[in-house]
Image (cartoon, rainbow, N blue to C red):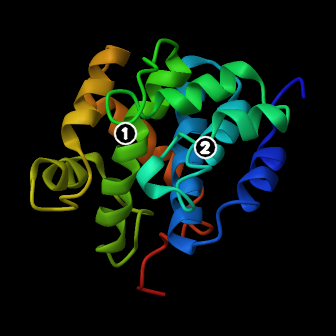
Amino acid sequence: MEKLTLEKAKEINATMVTEEHLLLHAGNVSAAMGAMAEHFGEDKEHWEAVGWLHDYDYEKYPDEHLKHTEEPLRALGVPEEDIRAILSHGYGICTEVEPLTNLEKSLFTVDELTGIVQAAARMRPAGITDMELKSFMKKFKDKHFAAKCNRELILQGCEMLGMDVRDVAEIVIRGMKAHAEELQLTGHGE
């Protein structure tokens, strides 16, 4: 496989991931990664594909996350740089693979950040469609809101990227807005 396409990533992921909330998370991260790719002037679809596939082994091995990723993906022909990027999102948590490229640093950062964006969007009548950065940042600063999402990791990732959390959040929100319907974030005001 010369390049991991989004279609191929979805195909591979579907062999392991069936739970709806994990598929939605894959979609959220994929959308956010596409927006980050645009920000850095990189290949949008490639970054979306890596985002879609990042939690490949999580459903089957939640306690051994990323320990069952490298070999299976290599056997399926996923390029080494993409495998490395996927492993790097567990840096300091369950792997020692340090995020070095913009793709790796972005994945590390948006993985948790999309969780807070999703939670904030679900509380709004119009979902993410009219979400502004200012209202999101209030939720971000409230440690009790979406408490399971690790803000330290998000800030660590932003530091790696040399970006302010507000700028990264704005990119992520924009990316997720573009996919609001498939991410079920259009709100409940229909």
145 or 92: which is nearer to us? 92
Q: Position of residue 113 (x, y in %)?
A: 34, 45
The residue at the point 42 percent across, 84 percent down is 188
65 relative to 135, above or below: above
Disc 1 residue type (three-letter): Glu
12 or 180: which is nearer to us? 12
In the figure, residue 139 lies in which quadrant? Answer: bottom left
The residue at the point 53 percent across, 63 percent down is 22
The residue at the point 55 percent across, 23 percent down is 103
Label whose residue precedes the other's in the sequence (1 or 2): 2
Circle 2 residue: 68
Quadrant where the N terminus lies?
top right
Q: Which secondary structure, mark 1?
A: helix
Q: Is residue 143 left or right of residue 169?
A: left
75 relative to 114, above or below: above
Q: Is residue 99 left or right of residue 68?
A: left
Q: Residues within 10 Å of mark 2 (few under 14, many from 20)?
A: some
Separation of marks 1 and 2 at Cα, in angstroms: 33 Å
Disc 2 residue type (three-letter): His
Residue mark closest to the camera, 1 vs 2: 2
Q: Position of residue 146 (x, y in %)?
A: 22, 61
Circle 1 residue: 170
